[in-house]
Image: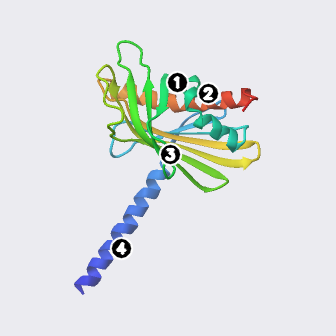
């Protein structure tokens, strides 16, 4: 009898956890719909910093979008405040470690990230870039800047047709340092929008890709 009760309780916990997960995923709040880009946010349980999701449709093939995302030497041309990105390792099993340095205007300090990027492709119709901060000796902390924390940065590319791609960016990061949360949350709302707007503009204007 005790075993049956334990099994029942475990099942209930699993069901409750699933219900909470579904509720969390559907609690996105639309805060902006401009230039064909939608911006959503929601409050997480583990941080006072809001999580953002942006979505748009780009008139380019998934191959062209992927080429732009993979072109690490030119990312600074369309990602706001990015000074430099570079790989710290080669790809192994679709994973590698990268480094990015972001400019911050005075009196704030520059920020940098060390993160793992993973490519996930379950079909030729969709490609996912998943990124999150990791600790690595490959890039020691530079005392002249602040090592920020990338909780999540996920690009999801989905084929709509041969020359049209749906792009979604989920972004959640803590820049650390003395910046107040209200200011960080403004950045969280604006930065992903600017990233997709610049990506969209770059792909729509660059005929050489």
Labelled disc at residue 209: none
Which residue is denoted by mark 2 in the rendering?
198
Quadrant containing the N terminus is bottom left
Q: Secondary structure at mark 3?
A: loop
Q: Residue furthest left?
A: 2
Q: Is 135 on the left or on the right of 154, as rendered?
A: left
Q: Secondary structure at mark 2?
A: helix
Which residue is denoted by mark 4 in the rendering?
11
Assess disc 4: are there few (<14), some (14-19) or many (≥20) residues with their C-alpha within 10 Å of its C-alpha.
few
Q: CA distance from mark 4 to mark 3?
A: 40 Å
Q: Is 6 on the left or on the right of 49, as rendered?
A: left
Q: CA distance from mark 4 to mark 1?
A: 46 Å
| CB within 8 Å, label 2 to label 3 | no
Q: Nearer the viewer, mark 2 or mark 4?
A: 2
Earlier residue among tags 2 and 3: 3
Earlier residue among tags 4 and 3: 4
Quadrant containing the C terminus is top right
Earlier residue among tags 1 and 2: 1
Q: Secondary structure at mark 4?
A: helix
Q: CA distance from mark 1 to mark 2?
A: 9 Å
Which residue is denoted by mark 1 in the rendering?
80
Q: What residue appears at the point 30 percent right and 74 percent down from the top-left corner?
A: 9
Labelled disc at residue 91: 3
């Amino acid at each position: 009898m005790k075993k049956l009760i334990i099994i029942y309780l475990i099942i209930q916990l699993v069901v409750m956890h699933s219900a909470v997960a579904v509720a969390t995923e559907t609690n996105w709040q639309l805060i902006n719909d401009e230039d064909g880009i939608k911006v959503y946010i929601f409050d997480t349980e583990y941080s006072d910093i809001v999580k953002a999701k942006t979505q748009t449709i780009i008139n380019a093939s998934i191959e062209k979008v992927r080429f732009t995302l993979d072109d690490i030497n030119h990312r600074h041309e369309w990602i706001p405040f990015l000074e430099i990105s570079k790989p710290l390792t080669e790809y192994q099993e679709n994973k590698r470690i990268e480094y990015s340095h972001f400019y911050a205007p005075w009196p704030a300090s520059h920020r940098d990230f060390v993160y793992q990027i993973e490519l996930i492709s379950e079909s030729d119709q969709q490609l996912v870039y998943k990124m999150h901060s990791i600790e690595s000796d490959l890039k020691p902390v530079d005392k002249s800047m602040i090592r920020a924390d990338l909780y999540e940065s996920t690009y999801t590319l989905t084929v709509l047709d041969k020359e049209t791609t749906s792009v979604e960016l989920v972004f959640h990061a803590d820049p650390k340092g003395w910046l107040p949360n209200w200011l960080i949350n403004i950045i969280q709302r604006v930065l992903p929008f600017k990233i997709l707007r610049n990506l969209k503009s770059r792909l729509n204007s660059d005929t050489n890709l």
